[in-house]
Amino acid sequence: METKKLVISAVLLCLTACTTDKKIEVRPTSENLRNEPVTPIEPAVVENPAMVELGKKLFFEPRLSKSGFISCNSCHNLSMGGSDNLKTSIGHNWAKGPINSPTVLNSSMNVAQFWDGRAKDLQEQAGGPIENPAEMAFTHQLAVELLTSIPEYVAEFEDVFGTASIDIDKVTRAIAAFEETLVTPGSRFDLWLTGDDNALNAEELEGYQLFKSSGCMVCHNGTALGGTSFQKMGIVKPYEATSPAEGRSAVTGKDADRFSFKVPTLRNVELTYPYFHDGEAETLAEAVEVMGRIQLGRTYTEEENSNIVAFLKTLTGEQPSFMLPQLPPSSDETPRPEPFDN
Ligand code: HEC
Ligand code: HEC
């Protein structure tokens, strides 16, 4: 233990002495990583910057919707933790969505996508909302026609994929490549994990210990503290749901999977309220109370609850930051948007 501390101080000293940069980056190394069941988030490795840039444009592209008004960013707002902070989302024609919008941040770490896991990965997922009548209400064919009518997009797809023809597979590949960059390293919790003793205060540490010792980590585990499995909502006591969502059984057809949902990531959870698939819990205190009671059969004191909440707030990492993409203008041939269904 003492040697470990010494090594940490040595590493920190060297970092202080050896860098001219004001901001000291304490990134995971085998020497200073704590022996904890979570690993810090690593910064994204961008293999194909041109594809990521194209995917970023498409993520912000409202013309991929029938109304010309709704983009991925409408419901996964990157200025608001990658979610919309609504109980359930608003789609085409102001349609009330059936379910809460999960964050796109760190979504590349999920075993599968959607609350019920019906898409195997980010590329498969990205095709869904474009043609969902209650979301973007377009079709894949119309989306491809629209992009093809804009010469700058045709040129950019050619640059990235080597062929001028645009198809939905390329569209979703580019969006997924962009989404893979939406990771949030550098949270206070990760700084603590990589050896910075001052990154967490006593309450936050207390909250983390309680989070571990009371069993939250049985389900919220891995780097993202979630996203690794499907679990029943209401293990010890039933959950009174307000939405008709059935969860995993909609995919597997198995009765045993009824009311199992993908365990959501707790990274950036301070930003992604309201909580649960039906958005019923408005605050973190409420979500923690419900989890303790129905998943673990445990009633926390006010102080315990507030310590866990304090810990959860240390999971907010560096949010994606970049220049807003400039979208090429429509051409005279571009199909015009239909914002209203009359
Ligand atoms: C109208 C709002 C809306 C729009 C537009 C929208 N989404 Fe979503 N998104 C949602 C909702 C709601 C869910 C959860 C649906 C479910 O699980 O059944 C979701 C789920 C996801 C997930 C899965 C995350 C997870 O943890 O399972 C990803 C990734 C995602 N959307 C990306 C996108 C992309 C990319 C686009 C644009 C092509 C997009 N979304 C457009 C509302 C929206
Ligand atoms: C048996 C597995 C399990 C355990 C144990 C568990 N959770 Fe959860 N947790 C889930 C599932 C599944 C959901 C999503 C349920 C839903 O939306 O219907 C969830 C959702 C949450 C959410 C809401 C996140 C969001 O984005 O909507 C928070 C916060 C949370 N859990 C915290 C905790 C805490 C704190 C503990 C320990 C007191 C805990 N969980 C214990 C499975 C678990």
Image (cartoon, helix red, strand yellow):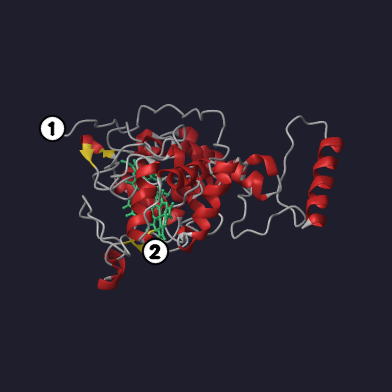
Separation of disc 1 and disc 2 at Cα?
41 Å
> Residue 171: x and y, percent?
45, 47
- As drawn, is 251 to the left or to the right of 191? left
Residue 55 badge: none
Please report the residue visible at 52 percent of the width from the left and 40 percent of the height from the top: 54
| Amino acid type for the residue under numbered disc 1 | Asn
> Residue 10: x and y, percent?
84, 46
Q: Nearer the viewer, mark 1 or mark 2?
A: 2
| Amino acid type for the residue under numbered disc 2 | Phe
Q: Say if mark 1 contacts mark 2, CB within 8 Å.
A: no
- Residue 326 shows up from this direction: yes
Quarter of the C terminus within the rendering = top left
Q: Report which quarter residue 203 is drawn in.
A: top right
Q: Is residue 36 above or below residue 142?
A: below
> Residue 53: x and y, percent?
55, 38
- Residue at the disc numbered 1: 342
Q: Residues within 10 Å of mark 1 (few under 14, many from 20)?
A: few
Q: Report which quarter residue 24 is drawn in.
A: top right
Total numbered circles: 2
Q: Is residue 275 above or below residue 246?
A: above
- As drawn, is 157 to the left or to the right of 258? right
Q: Residues within 10 Å of mark 2 (few under 14, many from 20)?
A: many
Q: Which residue is at the front of the view, 213 or 313?
A: 213
- Residue 117 shows up from this direction: no
Q: Which residue is at the front of the view, 108 or 68?
A: 108
- Residue at the disc numbered 2: 230
Please report the residue visible at 28 percent of the width from the left and 48 percent of the height from the top: 278
> Residue 330: x and y, percent?
39, 28
Q: Is the residue indicated by label 2 positioned so its CB lies within 8 Å of ligand 2?
A: yes
Quarter of the N terminus within the rendering = bottom right
